[in-house]
Amino acid sequence: MLYEHLAIADVVLITPKVFEDSRGFFFESFRQKEFEHHCGDYRFVQDNHSASRQGVLRGLHYQLKHPQGKLVRVTRGCVFDVAVDLRVNSPTFGQWVGARLDDERKQMLWVPPGFAHGFYVISEFAEFQYKCTEYYFPEDQYSISWNDSDIGIKWPLSGDAPLLLSGNDSNAISLREASFQF
């Protein structure tokens, strides 16, 4: 696998070596020791799988008392995936990085604990899978507004599909209103 550290160096785009022939394809999607070498000593405790239609924007989510690292990938369709640095002592606090993830390139994105995470579905439909370093605690989930001007994410919104947000994401707070104690 190829590990590429993005503009926020702790966020890593991972490109697997895919073997394809007339029968289909095969690739190794995770190897613990290699992951530790390039991303850090993390263990995963939960896997999640979501399906969303075009125009769905999920995020920007984070947990405060139980921060989650996420290794994310798209197994069907295409999304624009975003990580926002919420580590107050980081030189990149409040900055974001994004990557287009799809089922053709089969790339993954490592989003470390201390980041808010979100994605926007570009394709007609997408299936999104991710491994988490911490369990999901609904009482500890927070959302920062997807369109916070202080963060300035350049989402590739489509004029073909209406933007679809959950109630929580519609009522998310700004970065300035949020509290952090990672």
Image: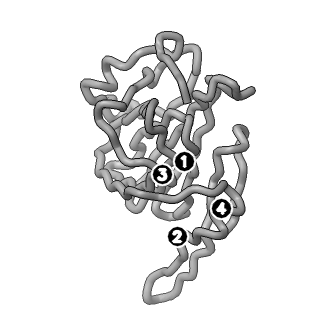
Nearer the camera: disc 3 or disc 1? 3
Residue 42 in which image quadrant: bottom right
- Could you say which quadrant of the image residue 4 lies in? bottom right
Residue type beneath disc 1: Arg
Separation of disc 1 and disc 4 at Cα? Answer: 23 Å
**Render colour scheme:** one colour
Q: Amino acid at mark 2?
A: Ser
* Residue lying at the far top of the rendered structure: 177
Q: Pick whichever of labels 4 and 2 is earlier in the sequence.
A: 2
Label 3, label 2: how far apart the Cα atoms are: 16 Å
Q: CA distance from mark 4 to mark 3?
A: 13 Å
Return the mark for residue 133. Answer: 3
In the displayed structure, does residue 83 sit left or right of residue 93? left
Where residue 144 sits: x, y (%)? 44, 23
Residue to which mark 4 is pinned? 36
Sequence-first disc among 1 and 4: 4
In contact (CB < 8 Å): disc 4 and disc 3? no
Task: Identify the residue shown where x is 74% and y is 26%.
Answer: 91
Disc tally is 4
- Residue 82 pos. (x, y %): 53, 38
Disc 4/disc 2 C-alpha distance (Å): 14 Å
User: Circle 1 sits on which residue?
Assistant: 100
Asked if the residue at tag 2 contacts the one at tag 1, i.e. Cβ–Cβ closer than 8 Å, the answer is no
- The residue where tag 2 is placed is 29
Say whether disc 4 or disc 3 marks the residue closer to the N-terminus: 4
In front: label 1 or label 4: 4
